[in-house]
Image (cartoon, helix red, strand yellow):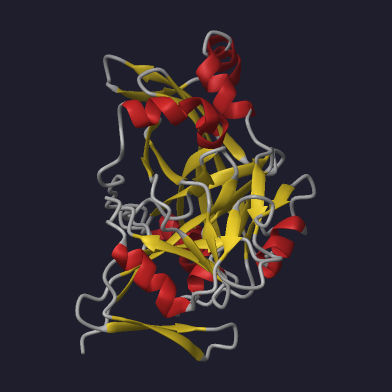
């Protein structure tokens, strides 16, 4: 039987969230999620050495990241692995703030073996369909090493042009939206470290996407999102996430960070197997339809983040975010399949 496992690896050809909810739903949730969306950032990653040799054909991984603190950004490991793993030198460009048609501030981080600025969770192994439990990486922005770009929109050229920091700061005084994007951070993570089994998520989740300074997001009011204890990740029907959305935040409706966009499983007439922490086949999803898997912060990944980000704020998922369920993996999939797809 044909087997297909799709990973949301980001690339130059970008796509936005499909069927993003708009109108009343977005208006109702905007105040609660404002801070969460402000910490969502657009990033681009590429091999520094290859860009110097052939800049016209260097492969750029376009993803999202979440700002945890002033100097720390959280993203999916698969967004940075190909360009930054091992001794590879890579460049990460983060759009710190952008007001469409007005201003933009970006920062470039140069990662090398001698001066590492990108940190990939050591348990991440690409190509295995258990990556959604280990798909975590951190990016450090050291102001002494980073390169900042200050830009304003040129109406005649219909493009951003570089300006000096003094001019940019002067314009920034009249842009509260830009200042909010630059200053926000210190959000709270929901830890799944103490969950011993599977659980149902009680709060609806929101999946934002920032592209060119414009925010869109997909929201779900459905109660069909589960944490699979044996695999240490969350599963739900597909939310229509697409290339370029990887590494972004999956937020609870109150603005807390539940996880990161990781992967999508689709197998129309076949099956998909899942491996445990030892790489052994633990569970098999028969006749897989279309499922969204996202990284939860288990004990290992939470410790990885904590070791770098000392100011990290967390709360346990057991504190009102989930309710335990007795169903095994097959039962969870059955429950999800019986619910209407959220598209």
Q: Residue at x 60, y 70 (%)?
A: 87
Query: Which image quadrant for residue 54?
Result: bottom left
Where does residue 186 sit, x and y in percent of width and height? 69, 38
Where does residue 251 sit, x and y in percent of width and height? 52, 45
Q: Residue at x 65, y 35 (%)?
A: 185
In the foreground, 65 or 222: 222
Q: Residue at x 37, y 25 (%)?
A: 160
In the foreground, 103 or 326: 326
Quadrant for the N terminus, please. bottom left
Q: Residue at x 69, y 61 (%)?
A: 302
Residue 148 sits above or below residue 266 on the image: above
Residue 35 sits above or below residue 50 on the image: above
Residue 115 sits above or below residue 216 on the image: below
Where does residue 306 sit, x and y in percent of width and height? 75, 56
Query: Which image quadrant for residue 283?
Result: bottom left
Residue 154 sits above or below residue 303 on the image: above
Residue located farthest toward the front when viewing the structure as drawn: 326
Q: How many marks?
A: 0
Res. 100 visible in picture: yes
Query: Which image quadrant for residue 86?
Result: bottom right
Q: Is residue 76 left or right of residue 292?
A: right
Q: Is residue 183 left or right of residue 92?
A: right
Res. 129 visible in picture: no
Where does residue 132 sit, x and y in percent of width and height? 49, 68
In the foreground, 227 or 139: 227
């Amino acid at each position: 039987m044909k087997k297909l496992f799709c990973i949301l690896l980001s690339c130059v050809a970008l796509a936005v969230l499909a069927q993003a909810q708009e109108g009343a739903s977005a208006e109702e949730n905007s105040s609660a999620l404002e801070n969460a969306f402000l910490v969502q950032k657009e990033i681009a990653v590429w091999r520094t050495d290859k860009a110097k040799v052939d800049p016209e054909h260097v492969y750029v991984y376009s993803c999202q990241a979440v700002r945890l603190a002033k100097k720390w950004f959280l993203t999916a490991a698969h967004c940075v692995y190909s360009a930054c793993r091992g001794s590879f030198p890579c460049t990460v460009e983060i759009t710190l703030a952008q007001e469409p048609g007005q201003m933009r501030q970006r920062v470039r981080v140069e990662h090398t073996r001698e001066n590492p600025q990108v940190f990939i969770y050591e348990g991440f192994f690409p190509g295995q369909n258990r990556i959604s439990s280990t798909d975590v990486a951190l990016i450090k922005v050291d102001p002494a090493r980073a390169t900042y770009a200050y830009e304003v929109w040129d109406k005649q050229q219909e493009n951003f042009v570089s300006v000096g920091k003094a001019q940019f700061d002067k314009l920034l005084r009249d842009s509260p939206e830009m200042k909010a994007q630059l200053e926000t951070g210190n959000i709270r993570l929901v830890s799944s470290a103490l969950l011993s089994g599977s659980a149902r998520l009680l709060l609806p989740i929101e999946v934002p996407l920032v592209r060119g300074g414009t925010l869109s997001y997909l929201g779900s009011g459905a109660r069909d999102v589960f944490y699979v204890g044996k695999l240490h990740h969350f599963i739900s029907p597909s939310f229509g996430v697409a290339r370029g959305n990887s590494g972004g935040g999956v937020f609870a409706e109150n603005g807390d960070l539940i996880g990161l966009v990781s992967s999508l499983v689709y197998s129309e007439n076949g099956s998909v197997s899942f491996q445990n922490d030892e790489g052994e086949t633990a569970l098999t999803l028969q006749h897989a339809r279309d499922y969204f898997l996202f990284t939860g912060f288990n004990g290992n990944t939470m410790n990885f983040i904590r070791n770098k980000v000392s100011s990290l704020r967390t709360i346990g998922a057991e504190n009102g975010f989930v309710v335990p369920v007795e169903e095994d993996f097959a039962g969870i999939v059955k429950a999800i399949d019986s619910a209407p797809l959220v598209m």
